[in-house]
Image (cartoon, rainbow, N blue to C red):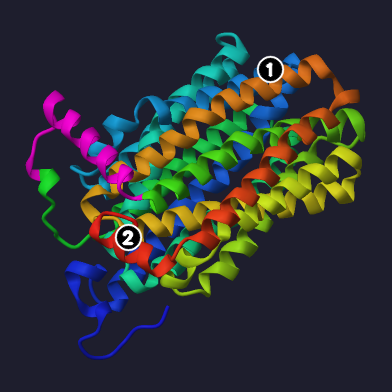
Amino acid sequence: MPGAAGATEEDIPLRSGGTPARWQSNLTLLVAGNGISSLGNAVYLVAAVLYLKDITDSALLLGLFQFLALIPGFILSPLSGSLIDRWSRRNVLIATDILRGVLMIAAGLLLVIGFGHAPAVLLTLSFAAGLGHAFFVPAAQALIPEIVPPSHLSSANALRTGGSQLFNMTGNAVGGVLFVVLGAPVVLILNGVTFLVSAVQELWIVVPHRQRAGKATPLTAETLRRDVATVIRYLRDAPVIRGRIIAQAGMFLLSPVFLLTLPFVLIDELGTGEQVLGYIFAASLAGGIGVFVALSRLSTDRLVALPVAAIAYAVFGLVCAALAVERSLPVLAVGAVLAGGAAAAVYLSATVRIQHSAPTEMHGRLFAVMEAAAAGVAPFAYLATGWALDRLGIDRISVLYVAAALPALLWALRLATVERGSRVHDADTGDKRGTDR
């Protein structure tokens, strides 16, 4: 990322996180730490899915695994957002990485010695790791504006998330192989180590001193109530940001149909090896990386003004419609790339919009709301999809794809209509005042 000479935006500590060398170093440390833990976590998720399928062959149980991982983000969102806006966001990242690392290693050791019921261990681990995730994600998103100049928010978010996606893609590609070679318990232990390494990386991030009003106020029941009321009022008066958060939640509502059916289509319908599941997950992440690279070339102002969500929903709907008609390995691979790109586009659009337009002291709460919105629908979507798949069976799986394609395409049409009817620059100005027009 280019620096600048003279008294430029990059040299203003309170806005940019320090000089170009300092904020670029901070961003590199954040990207590296997130990437290492993402690599191990991707391997773990593939191994856990394959392990649960092997020992139970239940789509409902796979849905429950995802439910338990996501539901803490919904339950804890009021508390996590308020705490993140008061605590050091860097320290939140370090603490949650250490917590998840210890949990993964402990669960792996329990499976190695054969202590406890294996599905119960994995389901408990999924919920416990989800608790850490509920704090980590909003804190990482809220930390970016503290260490990166406003003009570089788009590229910084694309670099952080795209880097994590790249490591995720690598982990997914080798996850199936490592599951076959090492087994799930060893994979869990290795994942725990990656979280601890990530925490060490994040220790070196230096956040410029900046006073936040929220930090001076202790968190009590009354201040928590006020924090919640403040963010509700803000979202009521900021329809553009509210719409981006809803779009992100909608993608989590529909994507389980694609993700949860993959193991059954690949292994049971197409008869592929278990390692192919990791390759298809990797293809999905490759699509996301491609979108992050493409969108990172846009200015922050341009990105927040584009109808990204409408295009993404149209693409996702067409992917599901294609899978309802034809399910071959090439179609699945291309569909994975496109679906991953659609999800990435919606995420980046929502994230940059909040960082660009909302008050910095509210970022933790707003990102917690975004996480809560996704976590509030995704667990139930996974459970419902797993239940429906168990009832329908592989022979009638096309019904699920049609059920996802129709609302995605209708939603895309609705979003496109809203975008055409709005004046984006006026909305941007309103967001910066705390109200969208």
Instruction: Report the quarter where the C terminus lies.
Output: bottom left
Above or below residue 143? Residue 368 is above
What numbered label is drawn on residue 357?
A: 2
Report the amino acid beneath label 1: Leu
Packing grade of label 2 (10 A; few <14, some 14-19, many >=20) is: many
In primary-sequence order, the first of circles 2 and 1 is 1
Magenta portion: prevailing SS class: helix
Q: Point out residue 164 in the picture as x, y percentages from the top left corner.
A: 53, 54
Quote the CA–CA distance across marks 2 and 1.
40 Å
**In the image, residue 228 lies in the stretch drawn in magenta:** yes
Q: Residue at x 70, y 21 (%)?
A: 386
Q: Point out residue 202 in the picture as x, y percentages from the top left corner.
A: 34, 52
Above or below residue 218? Residue 120 is above
**In the image, residue 242 lies in the stretch drawn in magenta:** no
Q: Point out residue 408 in the picture as x, y percentages from the top left corner.
A: 67, 43
Question: Depth check: 95 or 253 in front?
Answer: 253
Instruction: Report the quarter where the N terminus lies.
Output: bottom left
Q: Residue at x 49, y 36 (%)?
A: 374
Question: Depth check: 379 or 43 in front?
Answer: 379
Above or below residue 29? Residue 239 is above
Q: Secondary structure at mark 2?
A: helix
Q: Secondary structure at mark 1?
A: helix
Report the amino acid beneath label 2: Ser
Which residue is situated farthest in the bottom direction here?
6
**Relative side of 347 to 397, left or right:** left
Q: Residue at x 70, y 48 (%)?
A: 316
Mark 1 sits on what residue?
60
Circles 2 and 1, Cβ within 8 Å, touching? The answer is no
Region rendered in magenta: 216-238
